[in-house]
Image: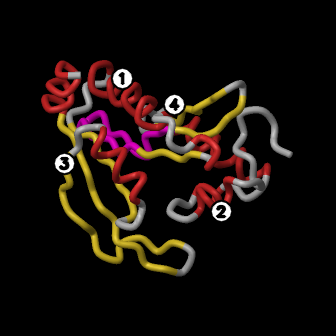
């Protein structure tokens, strides 16, 4: 069993999460989970990425992150993961709004991207709720568990983000 705050390598969410993203495979045991989190600690220290947990009732049920963040180019790629028990409560959308606000207002990020497998309807719905625009599809771009996935690229620009936040 993993320690507090470390993604559990086994459990009901592992296959659910692993359908579209590599986190379930990257954090297959305690050692690899620590290495995964250390990678994000290193990214944070280099101002090149971040990861934040989503907690409910003292339990880690998901996370939002910047897989990449380039402050020189002022771009970032946001993403998420969520256990099945936490789906449908708006947790990812709310958490993503917080980190995008921070990136735009505090770090000066101009463009935030959201990549989602074309079959990942829940992730695409989050991008829509965040007010992002679909930029296009990278056909058979990502090799995941032996299958090539089409990836949809969504984005929001800082002026669009600010305008959308004022309307809500």
- What residue do we see at 43% from left, 46% from top? 79
Depth check, mark 1 against mark 3: the one in front is: 3
**Given this view, does label 2 or label 4 mark the residue nearer the observer?**
2
| Quadrant of residue 140 within the rendered picture | bottom left
User: What's drawn in magenta, residue-wise?
Assistant: 64-78
Q: Residue at x 27, y 69 (%)?
A: 138
Q: Position of residue 40 (x, y in %)?
A: 56, 40
Relative image position of residue 88 (x, y in whole percent): 50, 42
Left or right of residue 41: residue 168: left
SS majority, magenta: strand
At 67% from the left and 35% from the top, the residue drawn is 60
The residue that disc 1 covers is 102
Q: Which residue is mark 3?
A: 133
Q: Label 2 crowding class (10 Å Cα cut-off): few <14, some 14-19, many 20+? A: some
Residue nearer the viewer, 122 or 154: 122
Label 3 Cα crowd, 10 Å radius (few <14 / some 14-19 / many 20+): some
Element class at badge 1? helix
């Amino acid at each position: 069993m993993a320690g507090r705050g470390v993604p559990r390598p086994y459990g009901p969410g592992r296959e659910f999460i692993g359908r579209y993203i590599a986190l379930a495979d990257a954090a297959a045991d305690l050692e690899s989970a620590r290495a995964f989190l250390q990678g994000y600690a290193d990214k944070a220290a280099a101002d090149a990425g971040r990861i934040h947990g989503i907690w409910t009732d003292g339990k880690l049920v998901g996370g939002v992150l910047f897989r990449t963040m380039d402050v020189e180019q002022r771009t970032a790629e946001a993403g998420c993961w969520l256990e099945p028990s936490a789906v449908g409560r708006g947790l990812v959308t709310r958490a993503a709004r917080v980190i995008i606000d921070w990136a735009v207002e505090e770090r000066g990020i101009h463009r935030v991207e959201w990549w989602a497998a074309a079959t990942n309807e829940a992730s695409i719905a989050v991008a829509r709720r965040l007010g992002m625009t679909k930029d296009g599809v990278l056909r058979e771009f990502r090799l995941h568990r032996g299958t090539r996935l089409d990836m949809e690229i969504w984005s929001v620009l800082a002026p669009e983000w600010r305008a959308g936040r004022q309307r809500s």
